[in-house]
Image (cartoon, helix red, strand yellow):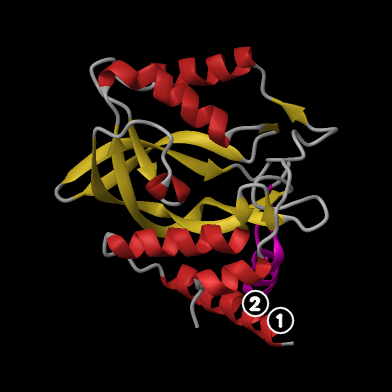
Amino acid sequence: MRLTPELLEFIHQDVIDPGPIPDVEHFSDEEYAHVVDELEKQLPSSEPVRVFAYGSLIWNPEYEVKRSREGKVFGWHRAFCMHIERFRGSRDVPGLMMGLERGGSCRGVIHEISMSKRRQSLDSIVRREMITQPCTYEPRWLPVHSGDQVIMALAMIFDRKGVFYRGGLDLDVVAERISKAVGHLGSNAEYLMNTNRHLEEIGVTDRNLCKLEHKVATLIHVRQRQ
């Protein structure tokens, strides 16, 4: 069983953005600038920014993509390991967001960004992905294999010291949470479906995500029939 627009409509809710999570420290403009400074120091000034997109950045990058190509990282895999109470979840029914967890490998897309948009794009990425402190996402330049080349690209990996890191959850627990969580950006299940569909468009099959999608779709289907 797969997720469908009809199943997503069953769990749809109109949710108002509750705003920043209270009692949690957030990044300041100065701190974002420092993160971007450090990332730029690690990248030769002659090199354009390349981003390894493995989830929503594939289908919703929010930066200008000059060109893209398929790529694969080794030593990391997709996993839903970040607790979220906003965006695609709520404080009452929290969801889970995906990132790169240690082990295995991951196929995705390398986005190349115009040199003229280098710093602007880096700032946009870190502001989108890094919100609370200690941050659950860590931006890191990873070697990405594409054809016979190895390209350094920016990716968001999980920092296990992050305040919302939730590693080691059983797949059934992950499926249960994703099947119920909805935020102002939509449902957690929609995020999973979109990621799988866009991976398929570039010829990538992630068996773990497919298995998870089947479990989530089945849970929603059962509730729909009750």
Q: Which residue is mark 2?
A: 220
Q: Amino acid at mark 1?
A: Arg
22 is higher (above) or lower (below) than 191: above
Residue at image coords 83%, 55%: 92
Q: Residues within 10 Å of mark 2 (few under 14, many from 20)?
A: many
Magenta span includes 122 = no
Determine whether the residue tagged by mark 1 lies in a helix, strand or loop: helix
Decide which of 89, 130 is in the foreground and name it: 89
Residue annotated with mark 1: 223
Q: Which residue is drawn at the image coordinates 48% and 19% (left, top)?
A: 36
Question: Is residue 216 shown left or right of residue 151?
Answer: right
> What percent of the width, then of the height, locates residue 187?
62, 58
Local packing at callout 1 (Cα closer than 10 Å; few below 14, some 14-19, many 20+) is: few
Q: CB of mark 1 within 8 Å of CB of mark 2? A: yes
* Residue 110 percent location from the top left of the image: 30, 43
Q: Position of residue 120 (x, y in %)?
A: 42, 19
Is residue 178 rendered magenta in the image?
A: yes
Q: How many marks?
A: 2
Secondary structure, mark 2, is: helix
Query: Which residue lies at the image location 65% right of the left edge and 77% below the top edge?
Result: 220
Q: Which residues are magenta?
A: 165-181
Q: CA distance from mark 1 to mark 2?
A: 5 Å
**Amino acid on which disc 2 is placed:** Ile
**The C terminus sits in image quarter:** bottom right
